[in-house]
């Protein structure tokens, strides 16, 4: 992750003033365009996949965590494992003053860094209405960071932090 002693990743500017390692925002970005081959196929999230300011996400809303738990994967197809969970703290209020929310889910080591999604749906709530009967693609709402031991509660950094790292 270094090139001649220089780190290759970008991290959130707030980390400059945070001295405690466990308090740092656990979200980074790495520019990969220099490493891509013409035959590579990359499916990635864009800012269109993020919730808008008007998107309503409520306590108990279902979520998916897509990742690769340690020591458990499909060696034939190399596809990720999907785990389910529910939003466990109030959306858009920073849990304990950090830019994260809680997810109620049993996750395993190795899923840190995994995307957390609101699944595709035919209904979506906004601050002013409920829209029914349309197709709504999944939304990237956060990045899984770790578990509060014994509680099955997981710290999920908000996806908007990516926009703050890569404007």
Image (cartoon, rainbow, N blue to C red):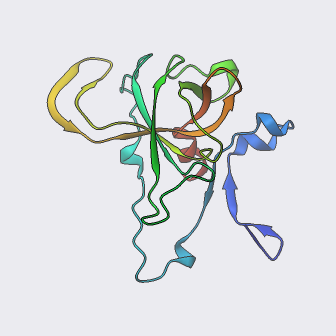
Q: Quadrant of residue 135?
A: top left
Direction from residue 123 to residue 48 in the image, left or right: right
Q: Quadrant of residue 13?
A: top right
Residue 108 screen position, x and y as percent: 61, 39
Nearer-the-camera pick, 113 or 16: 113
How many numbered marks appear?
Answer: 0
158 shown above or below 166: above
Residue reaching furthest to the right = 19
Residue 32 screen position, x and y as percent: 56, 69
Residue under the image location 50 percent in, 77 percent down? 36
Residue 19 screen position, x and y as percent: 87, 38
Residue reaching furthest to the bottom = 38
Residue under the image location 22 percent in, 20 percent down? 130
Direction from residue 140 to residue 25 in the image, left or right: right
Direction from residue 79 to residue 8 in the image, left or right: right
Residue 85 screen position, x and y as percent: 47, 28
98 shown above or below 108: above
Residue under the image location 50 percent in, 64 percent down? 75
Direction from residue 135 to residue 138 in the image, left or right: right
Nearer-the-camera pick, 72 or 56: 72
Nearer-the-camera pick, 124 or 48: 124
Nearer-the-camera pick, 79 or 20: 79
């Amino acid at each position: 992750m270094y090139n001649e002693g220089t780190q290759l990743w970008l991290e959130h500017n707030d980390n400059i003033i945070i001295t405690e390692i466990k308090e740092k925002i656990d979200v980074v970005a790495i520019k990969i365009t220099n490493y891509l081959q013409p035959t590579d196929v990359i499916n990635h999230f864009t800012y269109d996949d993020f919730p808008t300011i008007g998107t309503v996400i409520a306590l108990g809303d279902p979520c998916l965590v897509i990742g690769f738990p340690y020591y458990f994967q499909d060696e034939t197809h190399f596809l990720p494992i999907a785990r389910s969970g529910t939003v466990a703290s109030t959306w858009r209020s920073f849990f304990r003053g950090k830019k994260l929310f809680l997810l109620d889910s049993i996750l395993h080591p190795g899923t840190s860094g995994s995307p957390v999604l609101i699944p595709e749906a035919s209904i979506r709530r906004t601050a002013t209405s409920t829209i029914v009967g349309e197709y709504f693609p999944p939304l990237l709402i956060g990045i899984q960071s770790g578990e509060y031991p014994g509680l099955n509660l997981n710290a999920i950094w908000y996806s908007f932090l990516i926009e703050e790292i890569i404007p």
